[in-house]
Amino acid sequence: ISIIGDFRWADPEWKNVTKDIQYVSLSAKGKRIIMEARGEVFTIPSEYGDIRNITNSPLTADRKPIWSPLGDQIAWFSDEGHSNYVLKRASQDGIDTFPEISIGISKYAWEPTWSPDGKFIAFVDDDLRVRLVDLAAGTLKSIGIGGLNIERGDMGLTWSPDSKWLAYSKSGSNNFTRIMIWSAESDSTTELTNAFAHASSPVWDRDGKHLYFLASTNLALRSGWVNTS
């Protein structure tokens, strides 16, 4: 038995989404801006052109849009027709699409990051796994894991310019975050910073030889953020 109520809040209506804009970024050449608003993916011109609703799917939650390194494609996560999210891709104008890729046991995604060579997208899932999508093969694997649930969306995934390294931060058993780097060549992860230093926010130099990050070596025994004494 299905009983469908005539609820006013369930009626289709026009909605102004300008107050719900999030996950904003510039294209590679800075000509267009991509953003998410109320489950739709838009691109808007930085100066001249038209606003484009790339997804145009009011009944679907489309999240976390990102540009490809060349700016010719966009990718996002969508729950359209699925119990879990899948990774979708399209040309930057939304006309040409690519086969969607399942993210497997992951139920959601944070911090999607496209490798500079365009071959991979890394993200953090709901169980803090650092996941790697091979776009050509359509495959997925885990290459790391975070430390605390509150880190989701704040692990700072960042690729080196040659796409050979992925850096991020994670909490250790002492709750201090340390910098981790994953090697694409050896498929191994190295802890880069001292366990007694609090380090975060890694970013690669464009020369590919240096890695910058924020760190404190004297955090010591000061109160944690949840200490209410």
Image (cartoon, rainbow, N blue to C red):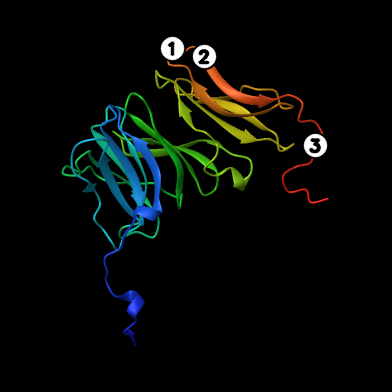
- The reply to whether discs 3 and 2 touch (Cβ–Cβ < 8 Å) is no
* Residue 210 - label: 2
Marks 3 and 2 sit apart, C-alpha to C-alpha, by 31 Å
Q: Is disc 3 surrounded by few (<14), some (14 to 19) or many (20+) residues within 10 Å? A: few
Q: CA distance from mark 1 to mark 3?
A: 37 Å
Q: What kind of residue is marked 1? A: Asp
Seen in the picture, residue 148 relative to 32 is either above or below; the reply is below
Badge 1 is on which residue? 207
Q: Secondary structure at mark 1?
A: loop
Q: Pinpoint residue 211: horizontal percent, then vertical percent.
A: 53, 18
Quick one: 224 or 99, which is closer to the camera?
A: 224
Q: Position of residue 80 (x, y in %)?
A: 31, 58
Alpha carbon separation for disc pair 2 and 1: 7 Å
Query: What residue is drawn where x is 16% and y is 44%?
Result: 95
The residue that disc 3 covers is 222
Which residue, as the protein is rendered here, is positioned at the far front? 47
Q: Nearer the viewer, mark 3 or mark 2?
A: 3
Q: Measuring from the top left, give residue 55's x and y in whole percent.
A: 25, 52
Q: Position of residue 38 (x, y in %)?
A: 36, 57
At horizontal 27% and vertical 69% (from top left) the residue drawn is 13
Q: Residue at x 40, y 19 (%)?
A: 161
Q: Quadrant of the N terminus?
A: bottom left
Left or right relative to 197: residue 48: left
Neighbor class of circle 1 (other Cα within 10 Å; few <14, some 14-19, many 20+) is few
Q: Is residue 199 left or right of residue 26?
A: right
